[in-house]
């Protein structure tokens, strides 16, 4: 179980001479991912998804808030002490091309973390070899043909599998998949998604899925929660299908409206929402962060910041003063 | 010349790249017709030869590649594959607009958009440069941008979506009526993508263009295209009206591809991965059907006979299994 | 490498013989465009013999230190006992701005010489051969008397070797009360000390003084300088202007001998002073059209000096053994075939001077011919042993002769390399160690860091100058106010560390004291002392004299002729450019 | 513009600190130098025939005003002088301020260095473009390898080879200084001709030794730019060849300008060899001379000047870049 | 502890890998004849430095009757002013030069890589401080500094000389390695290694360094030329005392003692060391050309 409360992250970009610019990547995010469960983060580019994923994987520090892994609060620990906890959480990188060291064979790549573990647990060297073959088989690769190869000799999909296998060497409790399929060929994507789903089911690994493609989120974490993030804030949170079917936050609705419609197979949603402007991070921070782009903004929106809340009649949490269901997604022709 | 949308007829086009293993075809024997005024979408996975095909439309395949056979007939221009030198240069930009795969980087970082626009005008002997600027501003305004500001900006001062729109503007400003968009929305986020696609559709209609959109995202094609062509391993495996192809895909690859896409609604378990993996230039089978390794309908004949593209009304499919079934 | 010759036109066709005379200032490598036309400035653009004049031009006679050619002084009389010299100035001498050269100019120049500490005009108390009084007898006559408390036979030389400067340009440099101060400085006590300091402090001012433009009493006057060349033009007011052949003189810059070689091989230089050159280069120089090599006397010799505080060089037999091992002919041939003649023996005196000073003693000296057998004999006597064909120290430890030389002294380096190889062949291990540059070399040599190193000796025509390099400060004896003191090895600059007394012909002599005596002895007194010292040097061998320099100079006869062949005309005193003197004497003629 | 001012301020501050550090280093090095210039001078005078006492007196006069006082005192004086642009008085050239000596020498360094660099830059970039275009061919290969070789060869090797060829074997070019003194300085043909004639070899050496570097740099820069999408985009928009070429050239040269400024600084350091070999009385020549003369003041002055020149070159390079590249220009401003 | 486990378990794989590596190197070299030439030249020089002096007596034979001779059959490059064979001098002198160069290259690369890695890996304050230092080092012109240094420091032995040159030369490598480190840091595989809890030693030693090997190797070779360049230059200028024969000493003596600029007889004496430097530079240039391909498995196997 991994929980976070009020996680804040601000990047300070140092100007060469004068003036630092602050990027408020996360503005107090709460999340909770149960053991073996799933959660998906969606949002526009630059809204802080990757940052949150990296914080959860322990690759980035956070400025405020609390993250607890299996009940152990990490904020009070020293960086060195946090490390073993964070090892339970492994990040699957978006880009399988840079996630593997081009100068090392797959064997070498898997060997390093395994021998570390063998050292800690007093296992034998044979175990290392065995385990390397095992994790490769787990991700659907043939150890015999893959082990001796260099990354450049593998296809993108195979590499992503190797990356996942490498993450499995340390028996993680959670995988953070940051757009893990966006750079993989369309025909292979589903394979990786299925693999993650499979691992979740078989090994009980929870999966945090970061994407801007809602449909994939549905595929892998359909039974989990969906977090819609906008400019570092969670604006809507709830069961995946609920949000897809009945989004209440105009931002979520904009996102869903933007999904291309398979004309001919699908019927466009009746009330598509188009934001008024495009994203501008330097916009004022006052009031609702989405206010300026929101076609439905009310008076309160420009002066007050709505917080994640539950309101009557809405099953999911949302951060909008005027929540309203709109039918935005396309439906298959057959259903209509 | 052509104030009307031109038609394009690609016939038997083969494009090869020189590699250490010899010259290998990235596009093989492709015939495709772009009807005047239509939007045609080409989908295919990475390395299937989409960009190569698109570049052939301008006879701009980069070395070590070359057009090895076939013709690209464009109304009002003739066979582009035979054009050379100045003639070819003048055709580019003026008759055929090209929007880049990575439009993000298709602008000279050292010059303002305006200056590049003027360069473009001068290159094509436009006398009324003011008029050109006016036209550009209008186009940009049409796409929801502040023309004056954009023309005064450098590439790095524009966001990805804005650059893409500038790219479209530059492709259209000389009044080209054939526009090729190579992956116009890759690397853009959802909302921007929707926006750009809308613009493409609208501008197409307003200006009366013939448009070719290339993408690996079936959703994009479905959103904009009238006709859809599916490429695999340098071959066109299926083409036809978008709705029909998506509604009842015939080629096993098209079918697999559509099935591999997770849906927003309905049973998620319906989605199914395609086995195997797409070929690269070196692994594309030299003869026989390019898809056979991953094909659920594989037959013996697939191993050594290239399936012919067989038309059936508006639809064309190149598959032994499908054709056999239908003609038998 | 030939632009000079082709661009002579500007001066070539002028009247009065005319022509451009090209030369170098061997005394000062590195022309300095920013330096003033001041003869006392070490980089000053003042060329003695050309643009600056001395009272007389002292020459290197074999035995007579006071021999000189007339300069600003047309003639002089030296008192029998050397107590005074009376100078008669050139009646027609004029500065280049037309003003006459007077006795006042001379007096002021002497004042300036005091601030610089010249030989005759020194404020150091008790300095030998210092002047006592300067009297202007009439506008053309000046009389200078010597302080007879510590007389020197070289007094007149010191006086004559004084640069004359124009008082109307330089007067501001000396304060009005200068002569009073000088008087005070020559006394004793604290006041004198202070006065001396003030006079010395004036020296700084003198050196830094920059006349707005060159005012010369010589045959030429400076026109302009750039970092590579200096141009002098004829001084119309020069007293012998009618006989001065060249209309212009060009000085070329150089920083190393190799540049002079280049100039010489292209036949560009009408005259160049002594420049060491390897045989090949010398041959090429000789081959250039019009070039001629003229040779004359130079009193200097070079030797390999030992630090006798270091083993085994404390043993005279080792030194003698080495002397027998080194074939001086071969060394000279490799290192300085034209610029030197192998020393006939080790006497501390140049072989030519030795003929004049000690003709009877010379044949009696041990010649130290190259003779391996003798050398081994000596080594054995010193207790050295030969093992596996290698000589080792008495205690069996290996012995390596380590010779030092400053980098850039190419003839010395060559010589040491050759010596090394000779020694190695004879079973004495040897090495050559170079020191980055001359200042460092001297410092380390004086600090006693080296076992052996090259050392110049027999400097100058005066007997004292000849021997003080062997039995002077470097070997422990300091001559302060005529009193000779000896300090122990390793102290007060005594790096040679030789014995204080040496037995010669059965009598013990103190070579340092004898050398000190030479400073005031007359010629006849000096001769027996020199014989003793030569014998001492010959048997005790503080240095192995290697070769005696030959004053080799280069002239070119294609543009000018009349170069002297006379020994004495070739080498002048301190920092003089002899060709300038030849020109002002009217010896040089433009070629017809 | 404020950006440039701000950058300049930062650079100047840093440059100032650096100059202080370098000055301090050189002060302490120089103060530890062994070797006594007095002894050498004395020896020289004696050798010329001056009586030993007189020689020692004369030397005392010459070096009488050597700096004394505690090390700290000397140091503060030195730094203080530095702030007033006073580098002290040359030891081997008494009475001449170091600054005067340096300015005289600097002009003989700066001119050939500038000329040589510009020459090599021009030739180098042109050939570099060529090498980039023909990079797959034999000729491109040859150009690249010859470029690396020339880039790798020490300057003095080139200089000596040139001297051997053009001054010794076929003596057509002089290697002896700046200008023939016979010509009246000024704008007359003779003077300028002589100036040019004698500058040929140093300039050519600077040019040759640098040009390999430019070929390589330009080649890789052009190759990078050629791979950039906007070049293909421009072609596909039907831009004229000349315009496309301008796009390539401008973008490729841009990073080279920085290197150009930097290399000027570097070349000043390398001037030592060339000036020594061609007897060209510039800064490097002066530096060697001062080392051999043990002229403390001059040595630290020359060293400082060379360093300062390098620092200035760095600053200029950066500012230049700021001005010329819109990305840098506004990249920071915008934030 | 992981390191101790690796050898045995990984041994078979390691051995074959290494064999593959060398086979790949061979292939890369064969690709262009110029590279083979470069390798041959470098091997030749190494051989010359290591074994060359053994073929000659401690003191080379001289001949006072044949000093400064032009090239002949007997003496390919003529003789020096002591009548010694110039070729023999070049060969015996190579040891000093090459040893210095090797030491310099080693120090340059070790110090530069260490500082660059540390700086790029730690980032933050350390990075700032180290990079300021590096900038400063890079700005101070090296040769003039060496000249000034030469007055206080006698570079007695090749080792000392190499030490000084190395300590003066690491700036460029440090900067290059740092920027490489920074860019590699951003690459997924380093991050993944950190996430897996692998030791910093492993990350630096096994992940970062091999990726930078071509840079480092290239810098090493370039440092070799740089070192040869500086030391020979310093000796040539004559600001260093020379206690051993060295190409720079030869150049110095050729010009300032034998008058090689004046008399063609001494040209051999001048040209021989010049040619040696030229050849060495050429060899290195030719080999550097192959570096990228050698260390990049993709280019290597192609
Ligand atoms: N290291 C960093 N330094 C400064 N700013 C950063 C850094 N990393 C991220 N940011 C900023 O933080 C914000 C959130 O970035 P993040 O990468 O988390 O977004 P994202 O939602 O993952 O976007 P995308 O969909 O493009 O991957 C962005 O504005 C980004 O510019
Ligand atoms: N310059 C080239 N040299 C060799 N092969 C090339 C070259 N350019 C492209 N190819 C090969 O040609 C094939 C088709 O490439 P192309 O760029 O047309 O594919 P694409 O469908 O546009 O792929 P993507 O979706 O990645 O853009 C690929 O296998 C590619 O490897
Ligand atoms: Mg992201
Ligand atoms: Mg493409
Ligand atoms: Ni360089």
Image: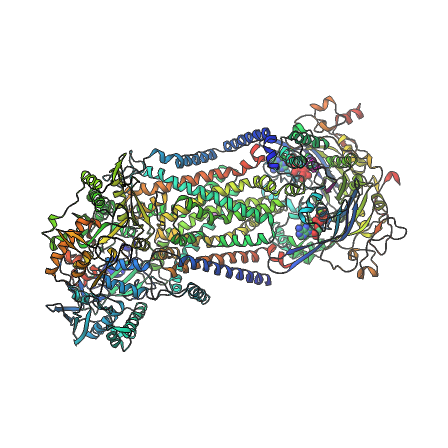
Residue D320, position as x, y percentages in the image: 54, 57
Residue D67 sits above or below residue A72 on the image:
below
Q: How many numbered marks does the figure carry?
A: 0
Q: Is residue D129 visible?
A: no
**Residue B128 as seen in the image, left or right of residue C511:** right
Measured as percent of width and height from the top left, residue A278 is found at: 74, 53
Q: Which residues are magenta?
A: A161-181
Q: Quadrant of the C terminus of chain D?
A: bottom right
Residue B281 versus residue A99: which sits nearer the camera?
A99
Query: Which sits in the foreground, C48 or C539?
Result: C539
Magenta region includes residue A169: yes
Image quadrant holding the N terminus of chain D, namely bottom right
Residue sticking out furthest to the right: A313
Residue lying farthest top?
Answer: B300
**Rendered location of residue C9, percent (x, y):** 26, 59
In the image, residue C386 sits, relative to residue D59, either above or below, namely above
Front-most of residues B104 and D288: D288
On screen, residue E209 versus residue A307, left or right, reads left
Splitting the image into 4 quarters, where does residue D113 fall? bottom left
> How is the protein colored in the picture?
rainbow
Work out whether D80 lies above or below E263.
Answer: below
The x, y position of residue B261, in whole percent, is 78, 37
Residue C358 seen in the figure: yes
**Does the magenta-highlighted stretch encompass residue A45?**
no
**Figure quadrant of residue C183:** bottom left
């Amino acid at each position: 179980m991994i929980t976070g409360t009020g996680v804040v992250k601000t990047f300070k970009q140092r100007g060469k001479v004068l003036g630092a610019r602050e990027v408020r990547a996360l503005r107090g995010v709460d999340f909770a991912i149960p053991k073996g469960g799933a959660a998906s983060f969606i949002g526009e580019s630059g809204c802080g998804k990757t940052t949150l994923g990296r914080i959860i994987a322990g690759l980035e520090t956070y400025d405020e808030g609390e993250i607890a892994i299996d009940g152990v609060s990490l904020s009070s620990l020293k960086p060195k002490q946090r490390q073993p906890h964070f090892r339970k959480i492994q990040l699957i990188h978006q880009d399988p091309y840079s996630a593997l060291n081009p100068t090392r064979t797959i064997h070498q790549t898997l060997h390093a973390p395994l021998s570390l573990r063998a050292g800690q647990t007093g296992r034998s060297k044979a175990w290392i070899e065995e385990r390397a073959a095992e994790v490769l088989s787990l991700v659907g690769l043939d150890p015999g043909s893959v082990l001796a190869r260099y990354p450049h000799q593998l296809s993108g999909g195979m590499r992503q599998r190797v990356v996942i296998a490498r993450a499995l060497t340390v028996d993680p409790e959670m995988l953070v998949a940051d757009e893990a399929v966006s750079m993989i060929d369309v025909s292979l994507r589903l394979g990786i998604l299925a693999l993650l789903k499979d691992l979740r089911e078989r090994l009980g690994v929870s999966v945090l899925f970061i994407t801007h493609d809602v449909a994939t989120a549905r595929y892998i974490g359909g039974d989990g929660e969906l977090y819609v993030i906008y400019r570092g804030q969670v604006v809507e949170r709830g069961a995946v299908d609920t949000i897809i079917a009945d989004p209440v936050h105009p931002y979520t609705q904009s996102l869903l409206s933007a999904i291309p419609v398979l004309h001919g197979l699908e019927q466009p949603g009746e009330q598509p929402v188009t934001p008024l402007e495009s994203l501008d991070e330097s916009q004022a921070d006052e009031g609702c962060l989405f206010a300026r782009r929101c076609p439905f903004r009310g008076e309160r929106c420009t002066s007050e910041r709505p917080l994640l809340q539950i309101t009557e009649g809405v099953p999911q949490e949302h951060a909008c003063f005027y929540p309203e269901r709109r039918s935005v997604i396309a439906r298959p022709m057959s259903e209509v | 010349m052509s104030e009307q949308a031109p038609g394009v007829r690609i016939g038997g086009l083969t494009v090869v790249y020189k590699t250490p293993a010899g010259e290998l075809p990235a596009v093989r024997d492709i015939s495709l017709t772009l009807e005047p005024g239509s939007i045609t979408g080409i989908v295919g996975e990475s390395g299937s030869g989409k960009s190569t095909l698109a570049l052939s439309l301008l006879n701009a395949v980069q070395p070590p590649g070359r057009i090895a056979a076939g013709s690209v007939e464009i109304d009002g221009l003739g066979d582009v594959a035979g054009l050379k030198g100045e003639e070819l240069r003048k055709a580019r930009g003026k008759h055929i607009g090209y929007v880049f795969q990575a439009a993000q980087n298709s602008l000279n970082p050292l010059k303002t958009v305006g200056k590049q626009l003027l360069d473009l005008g001068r290159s094509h002997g436009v006398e009324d440069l003011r008029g050109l600027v006016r036209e550009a501003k209008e186009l940009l305004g049409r796409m929801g941008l502040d023309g004056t500001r954009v023309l005064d900006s450098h590439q790095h001062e524009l966001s990805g979506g804005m650059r893409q729109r500038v790219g479209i503007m530059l492709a259209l400003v000389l009044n080209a009526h054939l526009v090729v968009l190579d992956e116009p929305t890759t690397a853009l986020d959802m909302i921007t993508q929707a926006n750009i696609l809308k613009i493409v559709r609208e501008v197409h209609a307003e200006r009366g263009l013939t448009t070719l959109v290339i993408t690996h995202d079936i959703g994009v094609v479905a959103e904009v295209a009238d006709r859809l062509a599916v490429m695999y391993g340098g071959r066109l495996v299926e083409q036809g009206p978008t709705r029909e192809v998506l509604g009842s895909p015939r080629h096993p690859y098209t079918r697999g591809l559509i099935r591999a896409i997770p849906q927003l609604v309905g049973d998620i378990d319906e989605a199914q991965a395609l086995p195997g993996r797409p070929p690269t230039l070196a692994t594309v089978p030299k003869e026989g059907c390019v898809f056979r390794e991953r094909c659920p309908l594989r037959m013996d004949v697939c191993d050594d006979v290239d399936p012919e593209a067989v038309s059936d009304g508006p639809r064309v499919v190149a598959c032994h299994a499908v054709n056999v079934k239908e003609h038998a | 490498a030939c632009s000079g010759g082709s661009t002579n036109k500007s001066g070539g066709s002028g009247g009065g013989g005319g022509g451009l005379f090209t030369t170098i200032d061997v005394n000062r490598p590195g022309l300095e465009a920013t330096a003033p036309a001041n003869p006392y400035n070490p980089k000053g653009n003042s060329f003695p013999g050309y643009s600056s004049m001395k009272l007389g031009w002292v020459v290197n006679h074999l035995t007579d230190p006071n021999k000189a050619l007339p300069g600003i002084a047309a003639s002089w009389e030296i008192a029998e006992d050397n107590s005074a010299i009376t100078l008669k100035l050139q009646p027609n001498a004029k500065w280049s701005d037309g003003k006459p050269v007077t006795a006042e100019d001379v007096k002021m120049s002497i004042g300036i010489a005091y601030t610089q500490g010249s030989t005759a005009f020194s404020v150091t108390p008790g300095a030998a051969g210092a002047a006592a009084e300067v009297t202007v007898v009439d506008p053309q006559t000046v009389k200078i008397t010597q302080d007879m408390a510590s007389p020197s036979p070289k007094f007149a030389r010191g006086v004559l070797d004084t640069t004359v400067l124009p008082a109307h340009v330089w007067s501001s440099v000396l304060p009005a009360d200068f002569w009073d101060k000088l008087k005070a400085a020559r006394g004793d006590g604290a006041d004198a000390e202070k006065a001396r300091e003030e006079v010395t402090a004036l020296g700084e001012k003198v050196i830094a003084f920059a006349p707005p433009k060159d005012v010369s009493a010589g045959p030429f006057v400076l026109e302009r300088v750039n970092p590579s060349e200096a141009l002098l033009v004829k001084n119309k007011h020069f007293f012998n202007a009618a006989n001065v052949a060249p209309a212009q003189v060009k000085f070329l810059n150089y920083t190393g001998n190799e540049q002079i070689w280049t100039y010489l091989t292209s036949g560009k230089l009408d005259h160049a002073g002594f420049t060491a050159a390897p045989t090949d280069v010398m041959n090429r120089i000789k081959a250039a059209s019009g070039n001629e090599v003229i040779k004359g006397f130079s009193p200097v010799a070079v030797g390999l000096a030992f630090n006798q505080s270091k083993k085994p060089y404390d043993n005279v037999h080792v030194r003698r053994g080495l002397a027998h091992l080194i074939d001086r002919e071969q060394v000279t041939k490799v290192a300085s075939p034209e610029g030197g003649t192998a020393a006939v023996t080790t006497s501390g005196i140049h072989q030519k001077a030795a003929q004049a000073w000690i003709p009877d003693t010379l044949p009696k000296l041990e010649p130290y011919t190259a003779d391996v057998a003798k050398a081994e004999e000596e080594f054995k006597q010193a207790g050295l042993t030969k093992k596996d064909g290698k000589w080792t120290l008495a205690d069996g430890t290996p012995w390596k002769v380590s010779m030092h030389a400053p980098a850039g002294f190419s003839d010395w380096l060559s010589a040491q390399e050759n010596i090394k190889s000779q020694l190695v062949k004879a079973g004495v291990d040897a090495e050559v160690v170079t020191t980055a540059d001359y200042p460092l070399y001297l410092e380390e040599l004086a600090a006693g860091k080296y076992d052996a190193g090259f050392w110049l000796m027999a400097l100058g025509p005066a007997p004292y100058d000849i021997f003080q390099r062997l039995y002077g400060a470097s070997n422990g004896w300091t001559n302060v106010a005529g009193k000779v003191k000896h300090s122990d090895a390793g102290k007060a600059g005594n790096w040679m560390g030789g014995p204080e007394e040496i037995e010669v012909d059965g009598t013990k002599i103190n070579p340092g004291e004898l050398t000190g005596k030479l400073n005031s002895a007359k010629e006849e007194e000096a001769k027996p002392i020199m014989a003793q010292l030569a014998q001492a040097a010959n048997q005790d061998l503080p240095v192995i004299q290697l070769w005696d320099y030959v004053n080799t100079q280069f002239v070119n006869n294609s543009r000018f002729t009349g170069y002297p062949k006379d020994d004495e005309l070739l080498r002048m005193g301190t920092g003089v450019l002899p060709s300038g003197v030849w020109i002002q004497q009217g010896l040089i003629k433009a070629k017809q | 513009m404020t950006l440039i001012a701000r950058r300049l301020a930062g650079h100047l501050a840093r440059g100032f600190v650096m100059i202080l550090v370098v000055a301090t280093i050189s002060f302490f090095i120089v103060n530890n130098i062994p070797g006594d210039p007095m002894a050498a001078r004395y020896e020289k005078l004696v050798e010329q025939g001056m009586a030993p006492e007189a020689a020692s007196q004369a030397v005392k006069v010459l070096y009488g005003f050597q700096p004394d006082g505690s090390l700290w005192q000397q140091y503060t004086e030195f730094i203080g002088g530095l702030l007033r642009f006073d580098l002290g008085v040359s030891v081997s050239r008494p009475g001449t301020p170091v600054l005067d000596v340096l300015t005289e020498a600097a002009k003989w360094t700066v001119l050939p260095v500038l000329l040589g660099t510009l020459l090599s830059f021009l030739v180098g970039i042109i050939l570099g473009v060529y090498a980039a275009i023909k990079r797959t061919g034999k000729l491109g290969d040859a150009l690249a390898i010859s470029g690396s070789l020339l880039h790798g060869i020490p300057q003095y090797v080139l200089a000596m080879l040139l001297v051997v060829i053009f001054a010794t074997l076929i003596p057509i070019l002089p290697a002896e200084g700046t200008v023939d003194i016979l010509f009246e300085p000024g704008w007359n043909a003779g003077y300028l001709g002589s100036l040019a004639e004698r500058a040929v070899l140093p300039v050519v050496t600077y040019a040759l030794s640098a040009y390999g570097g430019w070929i390589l740099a330009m080649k890789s820069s052009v190759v990078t730019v050629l791979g950039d999408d906007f070049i293909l985009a421009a072609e596909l928009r039907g831009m004229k060849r000349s315009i496309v070429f301008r796009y390539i050239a401008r973008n490729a040269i841009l990073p080279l300008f920085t290197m150009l400024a930097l290399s000027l600084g570097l070349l000043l350091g390398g001037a030592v060899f060339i000036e020594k070999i061609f007897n060209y009385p510039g800064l490097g020549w002066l530096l060697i001379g001062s080392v051999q003369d043990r002229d403390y003041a001059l040595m630290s002055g020359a060293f400082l000047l060379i360093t300062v020149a390098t620092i200035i070159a760095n600053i200029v390079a950066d500012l230049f870049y700021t001005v010329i590249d819109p990305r840098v220009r506004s990249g920071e401003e915008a934030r | 502890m992981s390191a101790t486990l690796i050898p045995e378990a990984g041994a078979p794989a390691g051995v074959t890998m290494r064999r593959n590596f060398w086979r790949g190197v061979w292939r890369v070299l064969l690709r262009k004849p110029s590279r083979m030439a470069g390798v041959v030249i470098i091997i030749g020089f190494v051989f010359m430095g290591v074994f060359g002096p053994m073929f000659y007596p401690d003191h080379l034979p001289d001949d006072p009757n044949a000093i400064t001779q032009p090239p002949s059959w007997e003496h390919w490059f003529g003789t020096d002013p002591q009548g010694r064979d110039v070729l023999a001098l070049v060969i015996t002198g190579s040891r000093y030069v090459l040893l210095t160069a090797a030491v310099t290259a080693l120090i340059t690369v070790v110090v530069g890589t260490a500082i660059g890695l540390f700086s790029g890996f730690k980032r933050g304050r350390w990075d700032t401080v180290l990079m300021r230092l590096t900038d400063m080092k890079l700005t101070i012109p090296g040769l003039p500094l060496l000249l000034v240094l030469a007055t206080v420091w006698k570079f007695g032995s090749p080792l000392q000389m190499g030490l000084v040159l190395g300590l003066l030369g690491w700036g460029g490598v440090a900067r290059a390695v740092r920027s490489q480190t920074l860019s590699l840091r951003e690459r997924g595989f380093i991050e993944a290694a950190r996430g897996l809890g692998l030791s910093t030693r492993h990350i630096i030693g096994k992940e970062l360094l091999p990726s930078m090997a071509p840079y480092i190797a290239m810098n090493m070779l370039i440092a070799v030329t740089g070192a040869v360049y500086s030391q020979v230059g310093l000796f040539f200028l004559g600001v260093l005392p020379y206690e051993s024969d060295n190409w720079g000493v030869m150049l110095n003596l050729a010009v300032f003692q034998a008058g090689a600029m004046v008399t063609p007889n001494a040209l051999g004496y001048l040209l021989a060391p010049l040619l040696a430097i030229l050849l060495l530079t050429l060899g290195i240039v030719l080999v550097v050309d192959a570096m990228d391909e050698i260390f990049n498995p993709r280019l290597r196997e192609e």
